[in-house]
Image: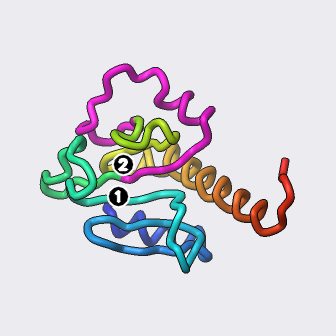
Amino acid sequence: MDEAAIIDYIRMRYPGADILTAGSGTFFSLDPEKHWPNFATLVTSDEYDSASNLSRSGIYRLNIGVSRSTFERLAGSIPDPDYTALDRVLPHPVYAAQHWLSILNPSHATFESTVKPLLDEAHERLARSRRRLATGKLEI
């Protein structure tokens, strides 16, 4: 998987997603006016942080905002993550406290089995939040 394939997947899977590229990042939100909050981001350089060493040729990081339970299940017990490891779901090097996961260069198999469900969760969480705000009602 390369970054263009991931962007294309998100564009096709979530046709209402707002996709904004700024600097070395692509940001996926549901708000075409504010472009925030995001349900996922894709970064290709160390512009935002240097933990993943994205200056390596062809390396990118996909970041996904998930629920607390999903975050804990997948990354909560990783005591000292190697943020430079490829194809591994890790806590985000900066936004782990907000339950963001990251993965450098996911393989096709990992994208299919792990990343797609995480993107679905992240997108739905943000869509549900926007519906609550729009209607003033709490969804269960």
| Residue denoted by label 2 | 106
**Structural distance between the alpha carbons of marks 2 and 1:** 6 Å
Quadrant assignment, res 45 = bottom left
In the rendering, at what x and y percent does residue 82 appear? 27, 30
Upstream in sequence: badge 2 or badge 1 = 1
- Closest to the observer, 60 or 125: 125
Q: Compared to 69, does 64 lie above or below? A: below
- Closest to the observer, 33 or 25: 33
Name which residue type carries label 1. Answer: Met
Query: Residue shown at 43%/46% (left/top)?
Result: 109
Q: Which residues are the magenta region? A: 62-90
Q: Is 132 colored magenta in this rendering?
A: no
Q: Is 68 colored magenta in this rendering?
A: yes
Query: Residue shown at 38%/53% (left/top)?
Result: 62
Q: Secondary structure at mark 1?
A: loop
Name which residue type carries label 2. Answer: Pro
| Residue denoted by label 1 | 1
Query: Residue shown at 31%/23% (left/top)?
Result: 80
Query: Residue shown at 13%/56% (left/top)?
Result: 57
In the rendering, at what x and y percent does residue 124 appear? 67, 57
